[in-house]
């Protein structure tokens, strides 16, 4: 089973923290969609006939498309791939949603929504230049529920400029009260070249200190677990049975095809990424030129990736799978390196699974790095 990721690099405005590839220029949308459909048809061998279990529209802002445009992409997938699709996710900006739009999305097969809420405090949304309001975010969740969506995820960010622990607690409480099935919560990162990083460097805003970020992370885990959400991955919390199938596949090292500008693909051995420029993507697709880069991953790089994603998951690393994928020597290396953390109580061994304890989760980056193979 495999997944398809469709990158829609269109946004209504640019958020100050974002370094994903997207543009507010929509003048080439038709050509862009044609190119995405062409890529889907020309790369149907990439997944070697594996049935498609999940489809994910990410971005950018896929809800900037009309539903008939989303439907036409789904149609191309259906016509060209062996589909046993269980989950179709669409990322959406609350500002784009109406009852009619949501109903049409549901009718065309989208069964999971991922809403970029980020915060329930108006000041936070302004500070990061989000397009939607708090009222619209709440309304969009309620409208989606009214239309029968029973698998809704919201994204939240903590460590925003001037955000207090009390503000974060308020955000978590609001999220819980909406009874969405899934919450992704990320600590704000200052990526190179973003507006927020420039503002920080000019001294206009301050980065949350480490201690506050740590307290926010603790509060996140505590509040969501108290309310029935399982932290199945470090930044992802779901009511039982509502874990993201698509993202879980990434973390379980399942191959996926990514189409559209800047989209990444993985076939089990190599990673391939498309050019992050819509104009060039369109012209190269039309001319039949190469529009991607490719890197074949050596065993050690794949091992490091597997350990990193594995330890971020609740069930941790499966040692039997690790041995099958990377051989006996790397298995023994892993066991040797992880032993210290088991003795310190930061990692728990349960049968063939090795996962971070509650204590280990708070120093996960350090432990993961220590387990990496370094030549
Ligand atoms: S809407 Fe999403 S992709 Fe677009 S700028 Fe904001 S965070 Fe980035």
Image (cartoon, grey):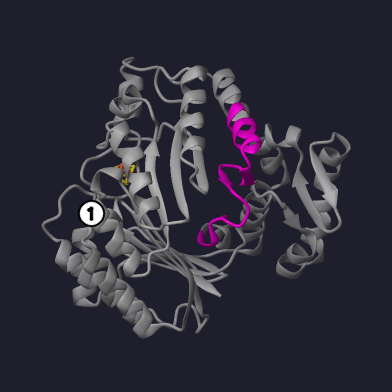
Q: Nearer the viewer, residue 40 or 72?
A: 72
Q: Please tell me whether mark 1 sits on a helix, a strand or a loop.
A: helix
Q: Is residue 53 left or right of residue 332?
A: left
* Figure check: 239 above or below 133: below
Place of residue 159 in the rendered image (x, y in percent of width and height, measured from the top left): 47, 25
Height in image: 303 above or below 341?
Answer: below
Question: In this picture, is 312 found above or below 275?
Answer: above
Q: Position of residue 319 (x, y in %)?
A: 79, 60
Q: Tell me the magenta residue range.
A: 219-246
Q: Which residue is mark 1?
A: 64
Residue 55 vs 25, above or below: the answer is below
Q: Residue at x 65, y 57 (%)?
A: 306
Q: Position of residue 108 (x, y in %)?
A: 32, 70
Q: 358 and 196: which one is in front?
A: 358
Say few, some or many: other residues with alpha carbon within 10 Å of mark 1 (under 14 / 14 to 19 / 20 or more): many
Q: Is residue 242 shown left or right of residue 354?
A: left
Residue 237 located within the stretch drawn in magenta? yes
Q: Nearer the viewer, residue 57 or 40?
A: 57
Name the residue furthest top: 203
Residue at position x 46%, y 39% in the image: 178
Residue shown at 51%/62% (left/top)? Answer: 246
Where does the image place residue 350, in percent across and percent down from the top left?
84, 52
Q: Quadrant of residue 342?
A: top right
User: Split into 4 quadrants, where in the image is the N terminus?
Assistant: bottom right
């Amino acid at each position: 089973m495999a997944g398809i990721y469709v990158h829609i690099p269109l946004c209504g405005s640019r958020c100050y923290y974002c370094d994903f590839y997207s543009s507010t220029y929509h003048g080439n949308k038709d050509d862009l969609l044609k190119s995405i459909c062409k890529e889907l048809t020309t790369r149907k061998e990439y997944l070697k006939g594996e049935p498609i279990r999940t489809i994910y529209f990410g971005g950018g802002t896929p809800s900037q498309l009309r539903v008939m445009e989303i439907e036409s992409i789904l149609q191309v997938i259906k016509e060209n791939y062996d589909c046993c699709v269980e989950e179709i996710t669409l990322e959406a900006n609350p500002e784009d949603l109406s009852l009619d739009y949501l109903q049409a999305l549901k009718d065309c097969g989208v069964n999971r929504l991922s809403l970029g809420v980020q915060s329930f405090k108006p000041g936070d949304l302004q500070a990061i230049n989000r397009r939607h309001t708090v009222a619209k975010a709440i309304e969009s969740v309620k409208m989606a529920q009214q239309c029968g969506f029973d698998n809704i995820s919201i994204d939240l960010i903590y460590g925003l400029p001037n955000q207090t622990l009390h503000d974060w607690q308020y955000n978590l409480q609001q999220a819980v009260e909406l009874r969405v099935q899934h919450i992704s919560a990320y600590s704000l990162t200052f990526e190179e070249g973003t507006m927020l990083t420039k503002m920080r460097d000019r001294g206009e805003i301050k980065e949350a200190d480490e201690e506050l970020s740590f307290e926010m992370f603790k509060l996140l885990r505590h509040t969501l677990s108290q309310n029935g959400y399982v932290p199945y991955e470090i930044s992802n919390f779901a009511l039982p049975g509502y874990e993201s199938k698509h993202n879980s596949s990434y973390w379980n090292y399942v191959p996926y095809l990514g189409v559209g500008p800047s989209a990444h693909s993985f076939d089990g051995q190599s990673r391939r990424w498309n050019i992050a420029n819509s104009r060039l993507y369109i012209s190269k697709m039309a001319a039949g030129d190469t529009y991607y880069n490719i890197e074949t991953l050596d065993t050690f790089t794949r091992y490091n990736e597997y350990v990193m994603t594995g330890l971020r998951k609740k069930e941790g690393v499966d040692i039997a799978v690790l041995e099958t994928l990377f051989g006996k020597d790397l298995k023994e290396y892993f066991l040797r390196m992880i032993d210290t953390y088991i003795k310190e109580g930061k990692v728990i061994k349960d049968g063939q699974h090795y996962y971070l304890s509650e204590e280990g989760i708070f120093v996960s980056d350090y432990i993961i790095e220590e387990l990496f193979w370094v030549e």
